[in-house]
Image: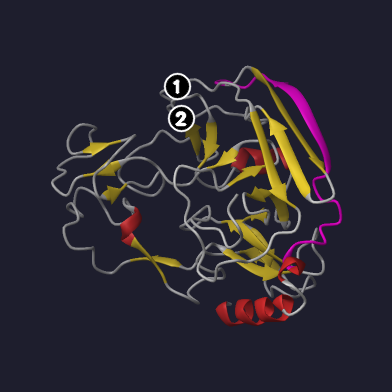
Amino acid sequence: MQNLFSVLVAVLSGCGAQSLGSDDGGVACDLSYSAFNSSAKVNATSTSTWSCSATSRLMTGNGIPDHDVTGGAFATPISAQNLSVTFTRAPAITSDTGTKLTHQAYGYVLNSVKLDPATDGTCASSATSTDRGAGCVAIMGTDPWNLEAMGGAFQFGTDESNAHVQPNGQYHYHGMPEAYLARLGAGTSVTLVGFAVDGFPIYARYGYSTASDATSAVRALTGSYQKKATPNAGRPSTTIFPMGTFTQDYEYVAGSGDLDECNGRVGVTPEFPEGTYHYYITDSYPFIQRCVKGKVP
């Protein structure tokens, strides 16, 4: 897949960098949703609106999920946010290896819930337990080992949609937004779920087997990150903290999955039949991309 990615980027770049996403056909330019969510842990109205100018796509919303939320152990109740985010309608790849973001959302689902895969949780090398206070903290951590919200020993209280709530009450996804997909009735279709902050679209789980061929079989795509065979030096005990607990436990292995280092690829989609760079939320690490290929606002 990496070879295909490189070839397609070269071809599309030859037509001008903005051709990677400029012909969006008015996707997500006239969406509006407002409904009361009586689900346990919500009990509030979810609102989101997407509109477009000639060059920009604007999302406004309150970040309240529009789907069931019944599980999870939230330290803070879900509360409405005042969100207004502008995305370019002509995204361009500006980095071959991607740009990592710090303390910034990677994107937003069409229901205005943000995609925020990393955590502020860390552990010291001397950590002896998954209990908070035993060398690990869940928020505002400064120790060297970065905790993952999913797939590790440390519990962050995520719900059935791999989401939880930040101290300010903002609900956000760390992985596949299962209940949102269920509300859409997405099934096994290639489903647009949102946009990254660089303007490129984000899809969930399923893509075409051949990136450039919309007639090829649809299947679940996989990321190209693998757990390291040997833990990094100085890492806390793998007996207490199994591999996958920390971000540093993973490494990018080109070609081991379907996607690049930013969990994306160039190819066709139902909304972009001429092809565009686009990201995927996957069932495997990194779940949600940990870098963006386009310009960061």
Identify whether 127 is placed above or below 73: below
Residue at position x 74%, y 62% from top?
Answer: 21
The numbered dot on residue 166 is 2
**Residue that mark 1 sits on:** 76
Q: Is residue 4 magenta?
A: no
Q: Nearer the viewer, residue 59 or 133?
A: 59
Within-10-Å neighbours for mark 1: few <14, some 14–19, many 20+: some
Residues under numbered marks 2 and 1 in contact, where contact means CB atoms less than 8 Å apart: yes
177 to the left or right of 143:
right
Within-10-Å neighbours for mark 2: few <14, some 14–19, many 20+: some
Residue at position x 50%, y 24% from top?
Answer: 169
150 to the left or right of 111:
left
Q: Amino acid at mark 2?
A: Gln
* Residue 76 at x, y percent in the picture: 45, 21
* Residue 259 at x, y percent in the picture: 56, 68
Identify whether 176 is placed above or below 215: above
Earlier residue among tags 2 and 1: 1
Magenta region: which residues?
20-41
What kind of element bears circle 1? loop
Give the Cα separation between the discs numbered 2 and 1: 7 Å
Q: Nearer the viewer, residue 235 or 238?
A: 235
Residue at position x 82%, y 62% from top?
Answer: 23
* Residue 119 at x, y percent in the picture: 40, 42
Q: Quadrant of the N terminus?
A: bottom right
* Residue 29 at x, y percent in the picture: 83, 44
What kind of element bears circle 2? loop
286 to the left or right of 206:
left
Q: Amino acid at mark 1?
A: Thr
